[in-house]
Image (tube, rainbow, N blue to C red):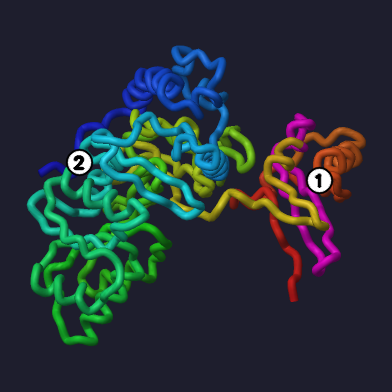
Amino acid sequence: MSDHYDALETRTQEVREAAWMQALPIQIAHAQAHAPALATSLAGVAAQEVNSLAALARLPVVRKQELLELQKASRAAGGDVFGGFSALGFGAHMPRVFASPGTIYEPEGTQRDYWRMARAMFAAGLRPGELIHNCFSYHFTPAGSMMETGAHSLGCTVFAGGTGQTEQQVSAMSELQPAGYIGTPSFLKIIVEKALEMGVALPSVRKALVSGEAFPPSLRDWLAERGIQGYQCYATADVGLIAYETAAREGLVLDEGVIVEIVRPGTGDPVAAGEVGEVVVTTLNPAYPLIRFGTGDLSAVLPGACPSGRTNTRIRGWLGRADQTTKIRGMFVHPKQVADIVRRFPEVLRARLVVSGAMAQDEMTLKVESASASAGLSDRISEAIRDVTKLRGTVELAAPGSLPNDGKVIEDARSYQ
């Protein structure tokens, strides 16, 4: 069997982008026609003109919090439970609905491998004809169904283990002899430890696809020492698979069914390659056609192609959350406000708002990178800080590239002791 799930993984980036740009105007027009919330956010956009990554970057970002608020408002008014983002209605075309904390409701359509998880499973070594032990939840959240539909598409049989009941999980694994595990990495560790405690061998479990939480190298190595090769994937309930790990173990390769941008937190502006920013996803799924969906997660693009032969862009994985809204002297300050300040000054390259001081004695300093600071720049930025945030702050000029590349726009360095 091939080392790759399909030919899409090894096409050139030029061919890939050409395919995206052929599909993107169609998806934009479809969203405008069938998803009322997106018709509103994309009002005035000529779908046929969104045929480049630059054109896509000019569209508004719909962030998870906005999606949540629109869903809640719509439900309160007795309207669409999905807030106008779903292109499907209840019935045969939507076999399941799931809920994420908030509460955000997500539809599941009928497309084969709706969440596109089979690609990540294949990269993790799972193969057709194998039994997979699925320990993601099957109720409320979609994780269990995401993985099961992907496994079925790959040609695997699934044991619906779900969460909890560790001793029963061990017994089922011992008797059914699955080839692999799917679930959170921490629960796999708990199962392996319980099996050791019970004196039960699990010789068949040699592969794992894990997600839902951090998978540090220490845990990866711990599993490997016990004969289990674990690989991680990055997915959300809103857009399905975003990226997945390969045998090269050098970052995560982006899925073929999404267009991913890394933008400066609080804005829709793409950052330079390698700079940490918010993951923004455009899905080509017609059932739930999210356009420039801000996940709220931070990551960064890795240079070069994956040694596994897959040619799509790689990202570093999950690096934190982009929503850095901070309360300062009784007022909320948002990353978008920092971006609004920066936009007023073309000579400012990047900025980082640092909040320091003891509790109730907040001090606010905006550190800005500038290659050619004009006379009086600090004073003018200070005035802009007051204008935008209604708070006083000092300004520190810094050399280009001196601020940390960690995606933080607002750093809370206060002492809470």
- The percent position of residue 265, horizontal first and vertical second, equals 61, 43
Q: Is residue 161 visible?
A: yes
Mark 1–mark 2 CB contact (< 8 Å):
no
Q: Residue 397 has which mark?
A: 1
**Residue at 46% in and 47% down:** 104
* Vertical relation: 191 (above or below) 32: below
Amino acid identity at mark 1: Leu
- The percent position of residue 150, horizontal first and vertical second, equals 22, 46
Give the CA distance from mark 1 to mark 2.
49 Å
**Residue 342 within the magenta-colored segment of the rendering:** yes
**Residue at 45% in and 50% down:** 316
What span is colored magenta in the figure? 341-368
**Residue at 80% in and 68% down:** 359
Eye-nearest disc, 1 or 2: 2
Q: Who is closer to the viewer here, 246 or 175?
A: 175
**Residue at 71% in and 59% down:** 412
Q: Who is closer to the viewer here, 359 or 368?
A: 359
Amino acid identity at mark 2: Tyr
Q: Residue 115 has which mark?
A: none
Q: Quadrant of the C terminus?
A: bottom right
Q: Helix or strand or loop: what does disc 1 sit on?
A: strand
Q: Residues within 10 Å of mark 2 (few under 14, many from 20)?
A: some
* Vertical relation: 313 (above or below) 200: above
Figure quadrant of residue 4: top left
Q: Helix or strand or loop: what does disc 2 sit on?
A: loop
- The percent position of residue 337, horizontal first and vertical second, equals 73, 41
Figure quadrant of residue 354: bottom right
* Vertical relation: 325 (above or below) 273: below
Q: Quadrant of the N terminus?
A: top left
- Residue bearing the label numbered 2: 5
Give the mark, 1 or 2, whose residue is nearer the N terminus: 2
Say left or right for 27 vs 417: left
